[in-house]
Amino acid sequence: MKWWYLAMCAILLVLAPISAAVGTPAMKWKTIETLNYNWCAATVAYEFVLTVPVDYDSGGDFTRLQVMKDGKVVLEVNDDDGIAKYTQEIPDGPMREDSRRNLLASEHLLMLPSVQGKSKCPVLMMFGYSYASSPGSLHVISMNDKQVPFEILRLRNFSLVEIKDLDNDGVPEIVGKECLSQSFGPGILTYDPYSVYRFSANAGSPMKLDIVLSKKYNETNYYGWAGIKCREDISVVLHPPGGGKPAIMDAAKAQALVK
């Protein structure tokens, strides 16, 4: 193979990414909301900037959160499916009532004084736009001991139900559903259990799904327990033909019971 051919190929490989970068226009952003807050009683307030691409045509109000301090971005969180107002995404119940105590003057960012996890400061929460029968996302951001924010929980589909100390250790857990129930006949629902997430020992470490607490919570607050996963091959029969409490069973058997 000719030396000049090899040299030309090498030059093209170098120029290709440069050419692509030059030909790709920078994304343009539109600011939806900006607010300042002395998170963790900081001497310099943190700035929260909510933006969305100018040509965005999907659900939600914004897709990017930038947390800034001293004019520098210290954390950026993106959600291409869109973030919505928390009052729209939190279902009716205890959590909706708690959201009225928001420390931030925002309809999109939620920070409750009583929800800190293992941090010394309240965590920040954002809620994604829900589509059809699927709940939106959940983002939980915590401040570590050096006052640097980290995203400690990111769930693509999660409907927040409550934040409560379930095991009496002084630290609350986050409770919700990753799926919304669907009906497959009179009094027959898909199996969609609650999931319980606990804070890790360190303020900036990821939260963890707790199977033991999830099982206990479902046995007390749901129709029973058939594992942590949402399933369509298992159904909840709300009114069994013989009477009694709602029963969890194979979907085909459930369909046969109500025919």
Image: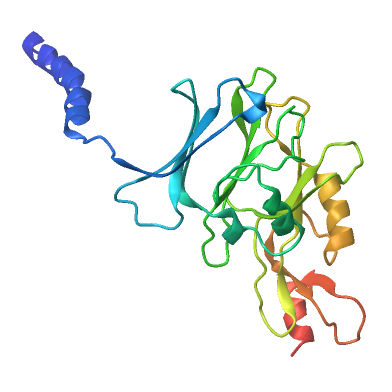
Q: Closer to the camera, 38 or 21? A: 38
Q: Tell me, yes or no, if residue 36 can be seen here.
A: yes
Labels in figure, total: 0
Residue at the spot 85% in from the left edge and 82% down from the top edge: 240
Q: Tell me, yes or no, if residue 143 can be seen here.
A: no
State which quadrant residue 221 falls in.
Answer: bottom right
Residue 250 rendering spot, x and y as whole percentages: 76, 71
Residue at the spot 51% in from the left edge and 62% down from the top edge: 131
Q: Closer to the camera, 57 or 245? A: 57
State which quadrant residue 208 falls in.
Answer: top right
Residue 186 rendering spot, x and y as whole percentages: 71, 85
Residue 146 rendering spot, x and y as whole percentages: 65, 17
State which quadrant residue 139 falls in.
Answer: top right
Residue at the spot 84% in from the left edge and 67% down from the top edge: 223
Say if 15 sits above or below 126 in the image: above
Q: Closer to the camera, 205 or 109? A: 109
- Applied colour scheme: rainbow
Residue 183 rendering spot, x and y as whole percentages: 66, 77
Q: Which residue of the protein is positioned furthest toward the top in this rendering?
A: 3
Say if 222 sits above or below 203 in the image: below
Q: Quadrant of the C terminus?
A: bottom right
Horizontal side of residue 194 vs 50, given as left or right: right
Q: Quadrant of the N terminus?
A: top left
